[in-house]
Amino acid sequence: MYTLRRWWDRHRLRIILASMAVGSALLIRQTQATPLFEVYQLLSRAFQPNLAKQTLLENAQFQELQQRLTELESQNQRLRELLGYVSEGKQPGITAPVVGRSADHWWQQLILGRGSNDKIKVGYVVMAPGGVVGRITSVTPNTSRVLLLSDPSSRIGATISRSRYMGYMRGQSTSHAVMEFFDKVPDVRRGDVVSTSTLSQLFPAGMPVGRVESVNLNKSPAPEATIELSAPVSFLEWAVVYAHDQTAQPTVSPTPAPAQKQP
């Protein structure tokens, strides 16, 4: 027993080192040196550039380029629609960008980047793909101020295109307006197209304004309809300005009487 103990004390270190070497070899063989590779990556990471941050930066730059491309494609599409709309018009219009808009008066007015130098005058009509936007209320050499149809102070003559019943429309500081009819029992229903009437002096007759969204025939003192404006007033970036002579007298066409039932 004493001899065995002396032999163990003499060869203990060699046996432990040999066992660790054999165990490490078996572990490397079983795991295909994965732990060793991870330890190497951990120790060498301090001497390598920050690849994670570099990858995030490259991804952010790629996303930025994608967003710019999407925005350019969107602007190109809007310009194509605008140019197509201008080419289909009966009279030439002046294409103008929206260059100013206040958050406090978002639904009331906006500023166009064209003015008297482009022969724009007060009273001219402003339109966009979809219909009427508003009218010019003031002009400088390079800018024009537009009173929007959505402004509560805006009042225009309107008519139901299907039945020709007339009234006047006022803005609500939203993408909707209210039309109050002259007749007590107008022929109007949801989905009807609304356009400017022949009684309107501020706008030519027959210009698209919107569609009827709901009707309240019991409203006092006159029936009302909620109109969804067809022009994209909330996100307008371009518009077309048309000349309009407000001094011209409108042609009055009487509203047709409701059809009488046969006895």
Image (tube, rainbow, N blue to C red):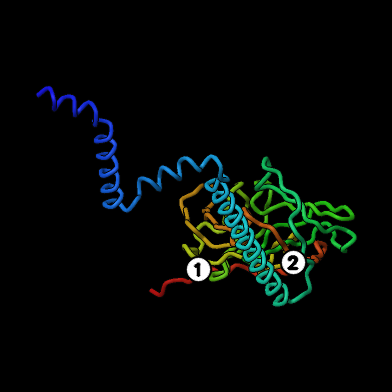
Q: Identify residue for label 1.
A: 258
250 relative to 150 in the view: left or right: right
Kindly identify the amino acid type of the residue bearing the numbered disc 2: Pro
Which corner quadrant holds the C terminus? bottom left
Q: Residue furthest left?
A: 1
Q: Residue at x 12, y 22 (%)?
A: 2
114 relative to 198 in the view: left or right: right
Residue 69 x/y as whole percent: 63, 63
Q: Residue furthest front?
A: 3
Per the image, label 2 sits on a secondary structure element best described as: loop
Q: Residue at x 75, y 62 (%)?
A: 125
Residue 41 x/y as whole percent: 45, 45
Kindly identify the amino acid type of the residue bearing the numbered disc 1: Pro
Is residue 176 in view from this perspective? no
Residue 165 x/y as whole percent: 57, 65
Q: Is residue 60 above or below residue 201?
A: above
139 relative to 71 in the view: left or right: right
Number of on-image labels = 2
Going from N to C along the chain, the mark reached first, 1 or 2, is: 2
Q: Nearer the viewer, residue 146 or 112?
A: 112
Q: Identify residue for label 2.
A: 250
Q: Residue at x 67, y 62 (%)?
A: 132
Per the image, label 1 sits on a secondary structure element best described as: loop
Q: Residue at x 76, y 53 (%)?
A: 99
User: Which mark's residue is nearer the viewer, 1 or 2?
Assistant: 2
Residue 158 x/y as whole percent: 63, 61
Q: Nearer the viewer, residue 229 or 8?
A: 8
Which corner quadrant holds the N terminus? top left
